[in-house]
Image: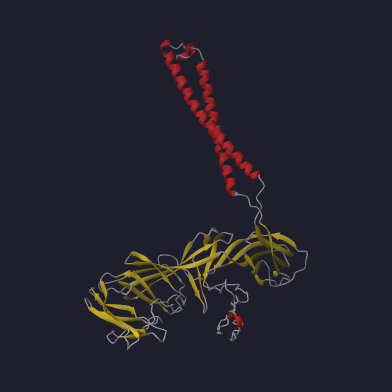
Amino acid sequence: MRWFILATGLLASLPAGAADMDVLSKIDAVTIFPNTALVSRVAEVELPPGQTNLIFKNLPIGLDPASLQVSGQVSGQTSGQVGGALVLGSVTSRLTRAEAKPDNAIEARLKELLSEREGWQVTLEALEAEKAMMLRFSQAGPEKLGHESRPLDVADWTKAWGAIGSGLAKLGDELRSARGRVRELDEAILAIDAARARPAARSQPAREISVETEVGAASRARITLTYRIGGANWRPRYEARLETGGGGRRAELEFSRRAAISQTTGEDWTDVALIVSTIRADRGAMAPELNPQRIGFRELPIASGTRPGMKSAAAPPPSGGNGQSERASAPMSAPASPQEAGERQAAIDAGPFNAAFKIAGRTSLAGDGAVKTAPISARGLAPDLSLKTVPALDPTAYLVARFTNDNDNEAPLLPGEVALYRDGSYVGAGQIDFVPAGDFLEISFGADDRVKVARVPVRRKENEPTWFAQAKTETREFKTSIENLHDFPVKITLIDAIPFSENAAISVEQLPATTPPSEKIVADKRGVMSWTYEYAPQEKREIRLGYKMKWPADRDVTVEPAPLPPK
């Protein structure tokens, strides 16, 4: 039977005198938030009867001690055995020096050099033996060089001397090269030996976690240590592939999301179960407190010569919350079978306040800051297509796909970059703002060259003040023509604007010749209007916009961009 006990911080206070045991642990699972991560380490230990302090060494200094959680499972016990359960006691965090680890790369290089040195030594000995044999042959008399020990014919002496000379020269070159390589290897081996013999550089500080345990009988236990750590983040990345259809076919949109993950926590994540969560665990847990404000007259020194006025009391800077942090991610449901849509998808667990995505399979990510992307979801949609143009800034019609975020188990879309493809061609990158579940999203897929847009000024009239009228006026009127050159109907939205005034001395009046807009205020932007029509094939429409401004003659006016409303 298995026993399970969860410990958070201090669970119990075990008696002193427990033996220390260093444990080897590995990272088994990571839940990564937008700017931090929750890491779970697992250690398999053989616990002796009684009390034991389990020591987790060389943990990153950046982990948050307040977030430490410990859980344990013990096997091999029966329910009727007294003291068979695992008891977890206090958890202690302290700073230490990280233990020097052997450099496996140096050891592997040394082994490689020694092996190569042995091979060259064999080659060197063979060449030396060949040279010695050739020298002995060259020292023999001519009478012994002929066939069956007969004297060598005088005419062949020159050939024999040439053969011996060229052979010795070739052997000399090979020996010189072999001895040079052996010297290089000896120097490299000596350098590596010297590096190994040097004292290790002063180690960086690390964190050591001690967990008190007690069991009634020898048991095999699985201890899980969980902590929060900074230096990790994930950002959403999206991909939208639009097939515009045509010829009676409906437009199709494949929309996929991925998680771009990176970490510099000080430890590598190797073969871990990875979850990305939308919880912002680096924020405070409570809203800041707003203090009351009192308004009164400012008392000025008499000698200052200034006129008493009124000044608003400045609000104190908001506090950062109570410093509490969220210590755990939302519980995950059992992972669903991966749905094949070109790549494996994550299991989505969307709660009422956050969403978590369990990445399919297991993942490895080095702690060097490299960015790794993991697929989360992909789905096919039937979007509503339309065209949008803002001819006051750009006389181009842009293709827009609109759909509702309602098919990801109510998971929101976080702000991120989206790569855009139209009919198989990459058309650029866009940006997605936060889209709650159930809300709609519009994505633009570039220019449509088969819609012609032209905006021209029709009238501009300025009236200078006269003796009777001490005010200036200015009248402006524009005409925009839009033509659908497609052989099928399309919906086109024109967006234009007139200036607005917040000063009672300046008036702005819309002219009666203005075509009535479909929407008088677009996205809560004052003065911005839109006209939306269904255009038949080859249809052309004209839309007029005019306004009149009036202000005091002794003042000058300027038209400037106004602050945008909050999203």
Give x and y (percent) for residue 135: 52, 19
Give x and y (percent) for residue 389: 31, 75
Question: How many numbered circles are shown?
Answer: 0
Query: Which of the image's four quarters has the C terminus?
Result: bottom left
Q: In which quarter of the image is residue 504?
A: bottom left
Question: Looking at the image, which residue is at 45% across and 12% down?
Answer: 152
Residue positioned most to the left? 538
Near-viewer residue (52 or 80) = 52
512 is higher (above) or lower (below) than 69: below
Left or right of residue 115, residue 409 in this image: left
Q: Is residue 361 in sight in this rendering? A: no
Q: In which quarter of the image is residue 8?
A: bottom right
Question: Looking at the image, which residue is at 47% across and 23% down?
Answer: 167
144 is higher (above) or lower (below) than 534: above
Display coloring: secondary structure
Q: Is residue 530 in sight in this rendering? A: yes
Near-viewer residue (509 or 404) = 509
Left or right of residue 452, residue 42 in this image: right
Give x and y (percent) for residue 243: 32, 69
Query: Which of the image's four quarters has the N terminus?
Result: bottom right
Give x and y (percent) for residue 351: 52, 77
Near-viewer residue (474 or 92) = 474
Near-viewer residue (275 or 337) = 275
